[in-house]
Image: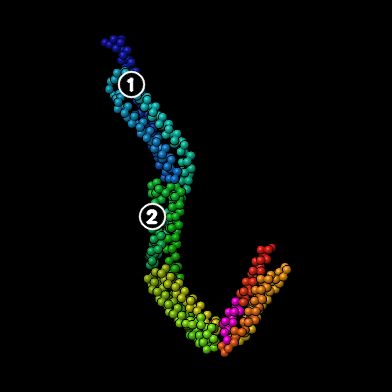
Amino acid sequence: MLGAGDARRRGRGAQAADAAAQARDAAAAAFYDMDQAQKYVEDRVTLFADLDGAAAAPVRTEFEGLSRNADAAASAYIAVVDAHDLSEDRTPAEYDAARRAFLAVTDRLREVTGRLNGFAERLAPQMRRLEAALDRLPPRLTAARDAVTAADAAVARAREEGFDAAEPEAQLARAREALALVGSPGLGGLGLAGAMEKAEEVRQLADRAREAAEELPKQAEKVRNGITAVRTRVDVVAGRVEAVRQAMRQLLRGYSQACWQDLRGAPEAVEAAVERARERLAEATAHAGRAEWRQAQQALTAARTELNSADRRAGQVTGRVAQLEEAAADPGKPADAVRFAVRDAQRMAVAAPGGPAPHHARALDALVERLEKAPSLLTGTHPDYWGYLRELDAIKTAAGDVVTRIRAERAAGA
């Protein structure tokens, strides 16, 4: 049988063991709470960095400090558990030392947990703002994916119909690459704002690819019609070559060199432009035969440019003949129109308050003098009608300039 003293000692030992066990359990609970808080905050910080990388640096820095404290507290807890194994019988003093060690590490764990929770609370308003904005991303991603799907179908149809869809397919490939980036973990490092922009970029790229693919049949029809139209126009412009040659012969026979020297070689230039247009037309036809519609359209544009050049040059020759014949038939008619312009400028100058300004009067007097001298160009067997017409044009332009200056000066003085 145990004596009374032994019973009391055993009672004190049991109490010390219970107290140590309770302290150990409290420490374990505190460790669990801290571990959960650390994981939660780490997840929030990671999400914050994904959504707003630009603002994440100070948040990460603060969390790293808290995380180091949490890791140190966890290491301290594990060390206490290893140092105080309560599965074996201990003396009351050892149980008491274990209890005090567990209580101390519990306080440390709870302090770190409180700091983690406080950090999470401070971060919460920014997270709510970002998460609210995050709700707008899924619809944009859906629109981007739908656009890629539609573009993929359009490109496939174009290829099935025999069209060269290399260009829309390249655009579609860029859209897919961008979509893969924005859909990757952590928003591809783009941040929320960058992900929203990238999703919109995907949609636009895919839309352009779809439109380009859908345009191919229309472009083919446009090119086919263009080939027919340009072929007809080539024949029409080619038919003007002989008329241009006749007009040049008429200029050479009936007018002075000054009237046609700037047109020298015009028939040959027109003929050469028509030939180049035929070559571009042949290129367009060949490209169309290979379903290379973009290249065919470029060749057609080049052919039209050559024909426009030929038309302009031909028009200069035939138009020159018409102008010169009109001037030769009635030299005074073009001068009358210029004389009216000069008189109109004179009336405007005279109507100014205080009469005409001296500099306007001098300019107009000089124009009148030039107008009177212009007929002197029409002398000799082959008068310089072209020089005469150019001088009249110059006088008319100068009279218009005077009118413009008078109006500007009146507006400035108003």
Looking at the rendered structure, the kind of residue marked 2 is Glu
Q: In which quadrant is the C terminus drawn? A: bottom right
- Mark 2 Cα-neighbour bin, 10 Å: few <14, some 14–19, many ≥20: few
In which quadrant is the N terminus drawn?
top left
Determine the residue positioned at 48% across, 39% down. Answer: 125
Q: Amino acid at mark 1?
A: Ala
Q: Secondary structure at mark 1?
A: helix
Q: Which mark is residue 31?
A: none
Which residue is nearer to you in this view: 188 or 13? Answer: 188
Question: Going 44% across and 65% down the picture, which residue do you hit?
Answer: 215
Query: Residue tagged by mark 1?
Result: 97
Question: Exactly how many numbered labels are in the figure?
Answer: 2
Identify whether 356 is placed above or below 141.
Answer: below
Front residue of this view, candidates 274 and 9: 274
Q: Is residue 332 visible?
A: yes
Kindly state the secondary structure of the residue where label 2 is placed: helix
Q: Which residue is mark 2?
A: 177
Q: Magenta residues, as a range? A: 383-394
* Residue appearing at x 44%, y 47% in the figure: 192
Relative to 370, is 266 on the left or the right? left
**Mark 1 or mark 2: which is in front?**
1
Task: Name which residue lies at 45% across and 52% down.
Answer: 197
Q: Position of residue 71 (x, y in %)?
A: 35, 34
Q: CA distance from mark 1 to mark 2?
A: 63 Å
Residue 398, horizontal then vertical, whole percent? 62, 74
Residue 155: percent from the left, percent from the top? 40, 62
In the figure, 287 relative to 119: above or below? below
Q: Is residue 331 left or right of residue 280?
A: right
